[in-house]
């Protein structure tokens, strides 16, 4: 059984789920699975996941048998931004297998469709992706090169230790990890060698289970699905990004103040992220496009809105490696507060292609209340929508140029 706890997911699933419970309890959604080409590859052969459909289904069935334990609920309740009624709801919550279908396709790929009430489907994404990863790798790499993985991890730690003491990283690697056991080993090594807390270099982890188990800080605010859903839930499409940020602020009253910037691209984000939001939110998160250009633009935007960038946090989380993290740190240190979330490069770096290639898999929301919703990122390969007419309309409404 790969997933043995419903806490084995990212914190932002719970923070978004609380908003859904309080503000959008009746929303109906649909998510779809996608396996992207590896970075730098425009076209590659499909990843043959179809042979493992029965194993994936068995693991999902086991996932749907879980419920939150008393100690897990107490841990969630201890977080100042998690409200008591939400924890009470989680106390009776279980994932329902009827909301998810996994299908083998003739191409050898798989299709995963999650469809149902947002409140009852939001927790599927992260554990299902972790299941797909672990099932695939335990079948295709029966003798993993853990020696290479440990050597690479040691090299990364040495590079971080040789850089400024205020450079901190966080683990964002749950969804694309090689395995749950390897994820835990990586976190234990990072904790021991980088240190945690104010004096350490490991700021925390997005994984709530390991945060509780290892005494780390759980990290996360909002994900793309939240802003996408607001395309259907808000009063007007053009105001959907503003509506999303205002609804978030209404829920958390100053907590969890990091705004995600790439659902409509940086230009549309900065148009909506006016002086009010610049002052209200603690910072912004980068997840697509050139991170160096993004950082410069966000810093300039703060200055133009009479906000001191030194009081705001820029979080970088798009496919980071340790060398890229160090480059970003060196460019922006002393100019703003910084945070770095590293995912696959920490939790699934066990060797070189073709022996080992991490899967670039995602599950994204494509519909809300029967209406198409979309992500239009600054990295076109990350776009996700099944309705080209809606995409064209969205580009027009948000004045987004078409990039192919």
Image: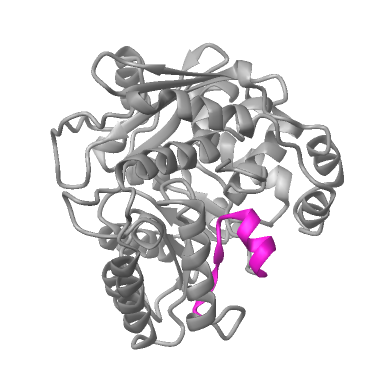
In x, y percent, where is residue 21?
74, 32
- Residue 323 x %, y %: 27, 71
Q: Work out whether 100 lies above or below 170.
A: above
Task: Tell me where residue 181 appears, x and y as whole percent.
Answer: 51, 57
Is 211 magenta? The answer is: yes
Task: Give whichever of 39, 372 is nearer the camera.
Answer: 39
Q: Residue 289: x percent and y percent?
A: 27, 49
Vertical placement of 238 versus 177: above or below? above
Q: Nearer the viewer, residue 268 or 116?
A: 116
Q: Is residue 112 magenta?
A: no
Observer able to see residue 208: yes
**Residue depicted at 26% across the width and 59% down the height:** 293
Quadrant of the rendering where the N terminus is positioned: top right
> Which colour assignment does the render follow?
one colour
Task: State which quadrant residue 116 falls in.
Answer: top right
Quarter of the picture containing the C terminus is top left
318 w.r.t. 138: above or below: below
Q: Is residue 369 left or right of residue 349?
A: right
Number of numbered tags placed on the structure image: 0
Indicate left or right for 388 with 354 as reference. right
Task: Note whether residue 238 is visible.
Answer: no
Query: In percent of the image, x 20 and y 51: which residue is there?
Result: 355
Residue closer to the observer: 197 or 244: 197
In the image, taking residue 86 as reference, residue 165 lies left or right, namely left
Q: Quadrant of residue 200?
A: bottom right
Which segment did they paint magenta?
Answer: 201-215
Identity of the residue drawn at 52% across and 57% down: 278
Q: Residue at x 48, y 38 (%)?
A: 131
């Amino acid at each position: 059984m790969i997933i043995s706890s419903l806490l084995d997911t990212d914190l932002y699933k719970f923070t978004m789920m609380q908003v859904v419970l309080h503000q959008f309890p009746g929303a109906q959604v649909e998510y779809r699975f996608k396996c992207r080409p590896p970075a730098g590859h425009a076209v590659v052969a499909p990843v043959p996941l179809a042979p493992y459909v029965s194993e994936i289904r068995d693991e999902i069935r086991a996932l749907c048998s879980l419920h939150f334990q008393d100690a897990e609920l107490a841990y969630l309740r201890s977080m100042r931004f998690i409200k008591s009624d939400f924890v009470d709801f989680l106390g009776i919550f279980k994932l329902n297998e009827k909301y998810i279908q996994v299908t083998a396709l003739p191409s050898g790929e798989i299709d995963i469709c999650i469809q149902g009430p947002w409140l009852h489907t939001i927790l599927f994404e992260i554990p299902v992706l972790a299941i797909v990863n672990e099932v695939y790798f335990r079948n295709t790499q029966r003798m993993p090169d853990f020696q290479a993985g440990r050597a690479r991890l040691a090299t990364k730690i040495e590079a971080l230790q040789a850089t400024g003491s205020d450079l901190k990283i966080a683990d964002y690697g749950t969804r694309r990890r090689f395995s749950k056991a390897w994820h835990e080993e990586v976190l234990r090594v990072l904790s021991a060698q980088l240190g945690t807390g104010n004096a350490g270099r490991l700021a925390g982890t997005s994984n709530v289970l390991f945060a509780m188990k290892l005494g780390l800080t759980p990290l996360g605010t909002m994900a793309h699905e939240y802003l996408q859903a607001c395309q259907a839930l808000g009063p007007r499409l053009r105001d959907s990004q503003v509506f999303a940020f205002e609804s978030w602020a209404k829920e958390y009253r100053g907590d969890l103040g990091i705004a995600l910037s790439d659902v409509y691209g940086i230009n549309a984000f900065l148009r909506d992220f006016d002086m009010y939001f610049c002052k209200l939110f603690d910072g912004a998160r980068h997840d697509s496009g050139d991170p160096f250009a993004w950082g410069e633009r966000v810093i300039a935007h703060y200055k133009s809105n009479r906000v001191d960038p030194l009081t705001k946090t820029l979080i970088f989380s798009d496919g980071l490696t340790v060398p890229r993290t160090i480059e970003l740190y060196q460019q922006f240190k002393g100019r703003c507060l910084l945070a770095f979330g590293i995912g696959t490069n920490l939790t699934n770096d066990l060797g070189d292609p073709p022996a080992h290639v991490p899967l670039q898999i995602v599950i994204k929301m494509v519909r809300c209340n029967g209406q198409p919703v979309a992500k239009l990122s600054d990295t076109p390969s990350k776009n996700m929508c099944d309705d080209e007419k809606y995409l064209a309309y969205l580009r027009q409404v948000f004045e987004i140029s078409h990039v192919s």
